[in-house]
Image (cartoon, helix red, strand yellow):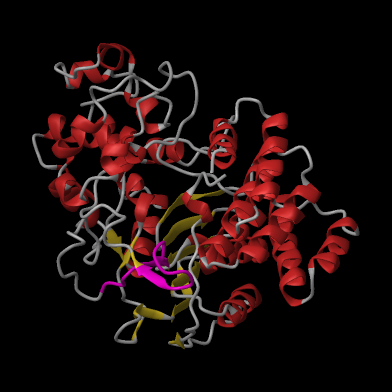
């Protein structure tokens, strides 16, 4: 069952590396450089620094496939949710100036906000930490099925969420929603009487000399910017530009453009207390006791690893800035393909090389090994690799590879990969649901129904399986 952008993939026969800097005498950075050179089809830029000295800055692949324009180390990339970092900093600047507090209810700043529950109960803290319960406009049918040109401003997005029912009670649960940061952008504008983009330009980008960063209009010309590529929904195994899939302009929730140098400047300024004082910098980079998301900050490494930053992913976008505080490394990674077309490989290899292995990292790379074993041999060989190993398979990653095969039109390979998922996770309703979909796409209706029924047995609330069984029985 397809659930996340994580499973979107692309395939490219192109591979191009440029700007082969020789890293300083740092074995870890040299190892990372060699690994990135070996990633077939990898497209993007990477910057790695240690102790505020840049050791590696390199570009790979193409910014424009049609004209064979190569990426370079100054190329701008869409950074998706990294923009939340800037919004969170802006909010803490206003808190530092005494104009807001974490406990400020949004109704105090936006007294005419339509939803009374939100107006009276939501606080700045809940928005920053994605615990508001606000509806997810980004996944609403109206947003998905309407020209993104209609949503160029913060105000134009408001009707998509402010009159909609809450998803959950305020502060009841964590739900990552762009809506939270759109609303924070409105609060910044209301408090400062300044348009959001002007505020962050003056108080963040200008302070850090980030001259190549901004919420540019993606449907207009952007100097030295990479196009984004995902696998086509129209033609199997073809690449598709993402013009109609993404917002036409960045917002407080993300979607702007930057390059590795600018994001390195930002990370350095942040950790050196140049954007907010040490009190609020420390608060932002303090890992929460529960979960991996704080106040506009992600903690994606192992618990207590001291790794903080923010990532972004969407159709044809994988981006991240990370500070490895204990080891004194800073990493910026920007790509113009889907997450599992090089970004995740690069991200996790960099983390493993700098900090050492963890169960999560071992699981990711073991799953890559199983997939390779299947593709280079057969399913029986891959099954032996799974059964002979003590490392647990990553269900998310093998499921993502199965859906890549569906999008590429390789239904037999998708079936086999989902069979491996079922082998490793026999009680996963989602694994059987995915297998049912693969059989359906291949035209084997009997086996499709059989696997959807197994999924429904494991989870009677699986409405997707119910609908598919009904549809297939009546076909």
307 shown above or below 135:
below
Query: Residue 260 location in percent, x, y?
Result: 37, 68
Horizontal side of 116 relative to 190 (left or right) equals right
Can the viewer see residue 357? no
Closest to the observer, 325 or 434: 434
Quadrant occupied by the C terminus: top right
Count of all numbered marks drawn on residues in the image:
0
Residue that sits furthest to the left in the current view: 193
Horizontal side of 110 relative to 309 (left or right) equals left
**Which residue is located at x 51 percent, y 38 percent?**
286
Query: Residue 291 location in percent, x, y?
Result: 57, 34
Query: Residue 266 location in percent, x, y?
Result: 34, 57
Range shown magenta: 225-240
Closest to the observer, 202 or 182: 182
Quadrant occupied by the N terminus: top right
**Which residue is located at x 42 percent, y 35 percent?**
295
* Main secondary-structure element of the magenta-colored stretch: loop
Query: Residue 32 location in percent, x, y?
Result: 60, 74
Closest to the observer, 41 or 232: 232
């Amino acid at each position: 069952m397809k659930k996340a952008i994580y499973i979107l993939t692309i395939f490219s026969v192109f591979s191009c590396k440029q700007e082969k800097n020789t890293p300083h005498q740092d074995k870890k950075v040299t190892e990372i450089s060699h690994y990135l050179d070996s990633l077939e089809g990898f497209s993007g830029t990477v910057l790695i620094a240690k102790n505020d000295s840049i050791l590696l800055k390199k570009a790979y692949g193409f910014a424009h496939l049609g004209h064979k324009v190569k990426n370079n180390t100054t190329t701008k990339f869409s950074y998706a949710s990294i923009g939340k970092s800037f919004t969170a900093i802006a909010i803490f600047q206003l808190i530092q100036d005494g104009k807001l507090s974490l406990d400020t209810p949004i109704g105090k700043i936006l007294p005419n906000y339509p939803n009374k529950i939100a107006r009276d109960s939501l606080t700045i803290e809940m928005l920053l930490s994605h615990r508001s319960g606000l509806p997810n406009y980004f996944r609403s049918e109206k947003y998905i099925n309407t020209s993104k040109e209609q949503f160029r401003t913060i105000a134009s997005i408001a009707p998509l969420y402010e009159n909609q029912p809450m998803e959950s009670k305020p502060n009841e649960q964590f739900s990552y929603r762009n809506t939270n940061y759109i609303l924070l952008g409105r609060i910044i504008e209301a408090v400062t009487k300044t348009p959001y983009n002007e505020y962050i330009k003056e108080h963040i980008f200008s302070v850090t000399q980030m001259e190549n960063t901004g919420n540019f209009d993606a449907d207009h010309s952007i100097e030295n910017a990479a196009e984004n590529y995902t696998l086509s929904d129209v033609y199997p195994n073809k690449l598709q530009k993402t013009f109609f899939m993404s917002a036409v302009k960045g917002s407080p929730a993300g979607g702007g453009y930057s390059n590795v140098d600018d994001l390195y400047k930002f990370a350095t300024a942040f950790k050196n207390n140049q954007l907010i004082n040490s009190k609020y910098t420390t608060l932002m980079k303090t890992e929460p006791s529960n979960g991996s998301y704080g106040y506009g900050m992600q903690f994606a490494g192992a618990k207590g690893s001291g790794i903080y930053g923010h990532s972004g992913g969407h159709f044809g976008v994988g981006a991240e800035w990370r500070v490895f505080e204990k080891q004194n490394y800073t990493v910026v990674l920007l790509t113009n393909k889907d997450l599992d077309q090089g970004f995740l490989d690069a991200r996790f290899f960099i983390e493993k090389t700098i900090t050492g292995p963890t169960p999560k990292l071992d699981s990711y790379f073991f799953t890559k090994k199983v997939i390779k074993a299947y593709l280079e041999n057969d399913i029986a060989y891959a099954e032996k690799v799974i059964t002979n190993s003590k490392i647990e398979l990553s269900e998310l990653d093998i499921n993502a590879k199965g859906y890549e095969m569906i999008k590429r039109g390789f239904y037999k390979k998708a079936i086999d990969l989902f069979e491996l998922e079922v082998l490793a996770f026999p009680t996963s309703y989602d694994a059987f649901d995915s297998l049912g979909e693969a059989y359906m796409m291949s035209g084997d209706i009997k086996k499709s129904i059989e696997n959807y029924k197994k999924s429904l047995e494991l989870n009677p609330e699986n409405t997707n399986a119910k609908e598919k069984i009904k549809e297939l029985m009546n076909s």
